[in-house]
Image: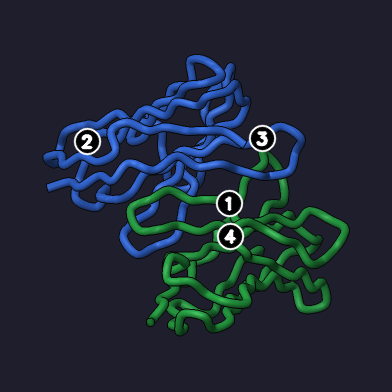
Chain colours: A blue, B green
Amino acid sequence: SAVISQKPSRDICQRGTSLTIQCQVDSQVTMMFWYRQQPGQSLTLIATANQGSEATYESGFVIDKFPISRPNLTFSTLTVSNMSPEDSSIYLCSVGLAGGTYEQYFGPGTRLTVT
Amino acid sequence: AQSVTQPDIHITVSEGASLELRCNYSYGATPYLFWYVQSPGQGLQLLLKYFSGDTLVQGIKGFEAEFKRSQSSFNLRKPSVHWSDAAEYFCAVGLGGYQKVTFGTGTKLQVIP
């Protein structure tokens, strides 16, 4: 398994601004994922961030809105840009274990409220 | 289309009673199967997983799940529920490229004294 931390744990932001969320892992991992969980909803994958390559975005998510960095094997950031109230969600990062088992471990999440 | 279904949005059980949460999937092949739990204000914790082999898998916190290929199901069970089990439970499946996982809509469990 892996221990994952996220910063900030929560934030309240004004519309039109941007917020960068950090995800730190206690071990080197190849695969990292960013999810959005809207209020009362399940998890939706935003993008896959593998070190050494550009992030791969899911349908409905674009790089201009959710730029992602993955500078090394233990760290990633997700930026939520030009925020609107519809971006109010919990944002979660996860890491995938090697071996092709689809097993993922999650950080505690960042609760974002946009006013 | 490939999908994961959790038919029960909300379940209420009495403390000490047994629990079964349902999960069905619709995939052409047998996927990797998972159950996660999310306590209020927390991230997701992996309860158990099925890859192959014995169809009854044991997880943490006294949970178990049974894979039934004929029913495309992976139901989560616990013989005796504790108040601390109140949380939201997500079934998830992994299949296809890039190690991506698809989550069900979740079942919120309420435990009453």
Identify the element where label 4 is drawn. Answer: helix
Residue where numbered disc 3 is placed: A97
* Real-space Cα separation, disc 2 to disc 4, in angstroms: 42 Å
Identify the element where label 1 is drawn. Answer: strand
Amino acid under label 3?
Leu
For mark 4, name the chain.
B
* Real-space Cα separation, disc 4 to disc 1, in angstroms: 11 Å
Frontmost of labels 1 and 3 is 1
Q: Are marks 3 and 2 on the same chain?
A: yes
Residue where numbered disc 2 is placed: A82
Residue where numbered disc 1 is placed: B46
For mark 2, name the chain.
A
Query: Quadrant location of residue A100?
Result: top right
**Mark 4 or mark 1, which has the lower sequence index?**
1
Amino acid under label 2?
Asn
Disc 4 + disc 1, Cβ < 8 Å: no
For mark 3, name the chain.
A
